[in-house]
Image (cartoon, rainbow, N blue to C red):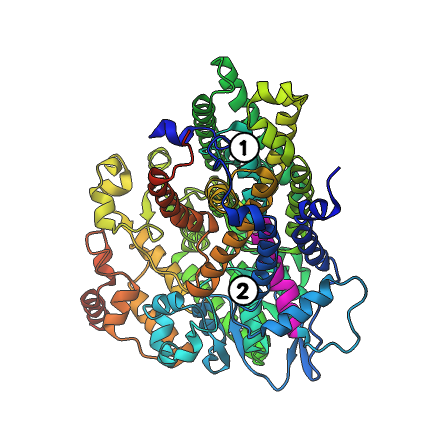
Amino acid sequence: MTEAIIADPARSRPKAGSPWTTAYGWAIPLLLGVCVLLAMLVSLCIGAYPMSFAQAARIVLHLAWPGPLPENPPWTVRELVVVQVVRLPRVLLATLAGLGLGISGTALQGMMRNPLVGPDIVGVSSGAAFGGVLAMLFDFSPAGVIALAFCGGMLAIFCTFTLARLAHASSSSMILVLSGIFISGLFVALIDLVKRLANDAQFPTMAFWLLGSFVGADPRKVAMIAIPTLGGGAVLMMMRWRLNLLSLGDLDAQSLGMNAGFVRWTILALVSLIVASQVAVSGVIGWIGLVVPHCARMLVGPDHRRLLPVSGLLGALLMLALDDITRALIRAEIPSGVMTALIGTPVVCFLFWKAQGKGWGRE
Amino acid sequence: MKPPVRRCRELLWIAPFLGIALIAAGLLRPQPRLPLPAHARTVVDAGGTPVPIAQPFRGIALAAYPNGYLENTRSPGLLVYAGKPSDRKRFATEMMSWVYPEVVKNDALWNAHLFQETDSPFSEIETLLAYAPSVYLGCGGPPDVVRRVGLPVYNCGGYGVTFALRRPELRAKVGCGSPTDPLQRLYPRHYVKEGGYYSESYLFPAIRSLTVLTGKADEAEPRIDAYCQSVADLQQELQPAAIAHRLHVSALGEDRGNLPRAGVTDAEWDFDARGDDGERLLYLDPDIIFITGLNASPREFMSDPRRQGLKAVAERRVYKRFGGGIVTKPVAMRWIAEIAYPERLKPGVRQLLRDRMFEAFHYRLSDDQIDELLNVKQNSSSAGAERFTRGYQSADAKGATQ
């Protein structure tokens, strides 16, 4: 069973996609994109202050449209404050975090040819979290937090690969996962050490931040995650053909004229940047990067040309939905990291159950 | 060469990226700010910031726990929001809920539908916008973001917020008798570090600013005078300067500001407060231990095998003490002093507590309520605690009459 699951997702693609996917698969990213934008507008209507969908859409449209806001707008200042200051930063933060994690998870799984890989499994999240708490310990600026989180993420992934290489099995899926688990364990221990060294004022901040939450979203945090996620994500999108080649294996990719090592490290750097920015602004949020690629693969198959955008958009949708559930239905600030784990675990169990019948890894 | 239609399909991912980027760019616009109310009176809060209060007055929404507000202002009628439902449960067990039972009973003040169970300042903004009180009151520093959008935020100070150090006009007024207070010379490091060391460093700015907010500014100084008079009476009776051997006291996880006034030495004054640390306690080996900040009772604490080497445990001098605000703090000081130096003071805590509550709120505490405030039951196994029981009080009074 394990072998079946760990098998190469690229090889597991259906021999020929379903007729529906073949004919209309190109439209799925577009549809999902529209769904994400609609979900963002719906999320803007959720909260204590009453806000209609039309009013939220009108305000967002005017905010996004270049040029000054109207002199006599059809909304009140209170409504503008609710949308621009309170809800929109949080909605954007959730959307971008989900988008980044979905893309990162898919890129890592494709590159490592291993469906068990996610940013939290290979140690990027733990490394970034360690960088973040270290920056908090030394009272760094928010930019310093993101920079150290990025360095931590890169260091963790470098360690993971180096460890796998020491075992003379850098291309073995199982060894990579094991290395990731070891390195993650190391960084988790370092995080605990930093927490122990923190003073009474720093400790609660660190503890809450590590659980993962969008509380306290503001324009600065949105900028901190938007630039790396949208920029890095765009570059990954442009590399999605190369990801297809890389998922065939290094030898095949090199025989097709691709510099596999360079592409691999470029992807790793981009993933680290995206995950680090996400961890820096909203803490460690697990499961999305692991679960969403599987859901997307069930929807559009393993071709990264479609899989990558669909994963990103599905991640954004899922993250937004979870955040809405947290703040609207449960009416409590349960950390998003906790919510994703509570929802992600049953999803993975379901996928495991489904895999017995259809399988990701059937040869 | 791909056909143009296929190339366009391959680039469809750009659309949501672009959409999200454009919406995110909308946040770069200047933040909106609520206009000033048409009719307002401006008051300066404990942080020195002028706050416009809309007129006619629509009420106060508390971001802080209601106990302190009520003890300082005695104006429950001005509240439109008192706290979260979890705050209500806690408040219902405390002294101010006896004095103002209507605050606990009024569901509207603890409205879970309008005010979410969250500590997020952003959700607070939203709920405040929905409820529109005249002023949003926070003690300990409400988030700047609430103020930035133009909501009337009033900062009433709070423990650990050293406004007094930043505002010279308040610095001169910190503490009863400071800055010439002799205790300042004994604890210079804390005097600087905590803005005056004593509880007064946050109690006085809080009452001064809150009474201004509620339009009863003239009531602050008499209450402060009453506090200082109680402190002076205690000093007069205790004569702390004449105490040859000052007892060392550890107050685990709680306010240590009262200790010097009670004539005892804070054994942990050179340590950052980190709650219960068994080894540190063994190292310090204080004469008396207060464990209000811990969940354990004095009896449980003293029966813990890890504590058996402590002098305070051997002498059963472990207590759970009570605190409070400007009304009950002087009583708490006397309570500590009577515990530490029973031979220097007559038993007077129960009567003093009863008197101060009546003077302040015209509320008569029952014996049961006093027992509860003084933790008589919990301290029953501690040395000298019988001094605070009602029987002891009457026996003493009888003796005094004879």
Label 2: few (<14), some (14–19) or many (≥20) C-alpha neighbours in 10 Å = many
- Helix, strand, or loop for circle 2? helix
Q: In this view, does A188 lie above or below B157?
A: above
Q: Nearer the viewer, residue B165 or B300?
A: B300
Return the residue at label 2: B123
The answer to whether residue B185 shows anywhere in this view is no
* Chain ID, mark 2: B
- Helix, strand, or loop for circle 1? helix
Return the residue at label 1: A110
Image spot of residue A334 (x, y percent): 44, 55
The residue positioned 73% from the left and 67% from the top of the image is A62
Q: Nearer the viewer, residue B42 or A337?
A: A337
Which kind of residue does numbered mark 2 sit on?
Ser
> Distance of mark 1 from mark 2, alpha carbons?
39 Å
Q: In the figure, residue A82 lies in which quadrant?
A: bottom right
Q: Is residue A313 found left or right of B51 in the rendered image?
A: left
The residue positioned 43% from the left and 75% from the top of the image is B111
Asked if the magenta segment contains residue B242, the reply would be: no
Q: In which quarter of the image is the N terminus of chain A?
A: top left
Image spot of residue B102 (x, y percent): 37, 81
Image spot of residue B336 (x, y percent): 35, 55
The answer to whether residue B287 shows anywhere in this view is yes
The nearer-to-camera label among 1 and 2 is 1
Q: In the figure, residue B315 lies in which quadrant?
A: top left
Image spot of residue A330 (x, y percent): 41, 62
Q: In which quarter of the image is the C terminus of chain A?
A: top left
